[in-house]
Image (spheres, grey):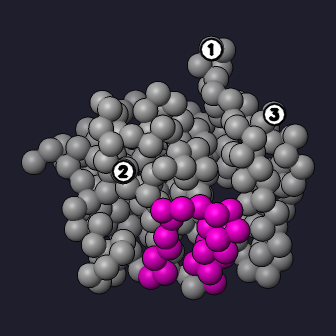
Amino acid sequence: MEPDRIPELLAPFLGSGSARQALSVTQVNHISMYIDILLRWNARINLTSLRQPEEIVTRHVGESFFAARHLFPKHDLRSGTEPGGGERQVHVIDVGSGAGFPGLPIKIWAPRIHLTLIESNQKKATFLREVVRHLGLDEADVFAGRLQDFGKDNSGSGAQQRNGADVVTLRAVEQFDSILPAAANLVAPGGLLALLVGESQLKLARQLTLGFRWSLPAKLPGSASRVLTILSKESS
């Protein structure tokens, strides 16, 4: 995809007025390469029902960047530190990553985080590894297995999972009622759970996330019913 069109397409998701945050040349190029790889793979395996590059940018990448700028404002995590000036690396887990949304765009937005993509479909997991390799993303790994099996090993992502993740993201997954509680369990005390869901799912989500403080859901630009809501896990 031609990089020149990307900033215009993503503008509604990046804030307005003085709050709007510009993308770097590297970020735009990474998005362009990501879309190109996605389109090639989508001809072989079903990664997304969308076929036009601009639709993929505005729907998938846009929603992901909307979440990224709310989770990781420019003044803290984009610089690679946690809020308050700490130097500890932030760990983000994207559950049911599929074609990589929102996890990979979040990594493009905040390159110094450690990202773990959880995807049980082996072909999709292979695709995710290809994107990570092609874009040269450091501190990004793919767990090719079920969420319920994540953390059972003693190395890599599993070792990190024992202490919980700083941020867990969830978007457009099947079996929402069973996946959401398992995803919530991955969040460390004081960490965040970011949901990109339909408004109709909010009532169920509240019932399934006891022990979390809810923020006011934010409407996704260009969507009539989809929202971003960020939950904070209470410290024990």
* Left or right of 29 in this view: 184: left
- Callout in the foreground (2, 1): 2
The N terminus sits in image quarter: bottom right
Whichever of labels 1 and 3 marks the residue nearer the N terminus, that label is 3
| Res. 8 mark | 3
N-terminal of the pair, mark 3 or mark 2, is 3
SS for dot 1 = helix
Say if the magenta span includes residue 124: yes
Q: Amino acid at mark 1?
A: Ser
Residue 21 left/right relative to 176: right
- Magenta residues span 123-145
Q: Are marks 2 and 1 in contact (CB under 8 Å)?
A: no
Residue type pointed to by label 3:
Glu
* Label drawn at residue 89: 2
Q: Does the segment drawn in magenta span residue 65?
A: no
**Relative depth, front residue between 91 and 236:** 91
Callout 3: helix, strand or loop?
Answer: helix
Q: Is residue 44 above or below residue 106?
A: below
Q: Pick whichever, 34 or 43, lies toward us.
A: 34
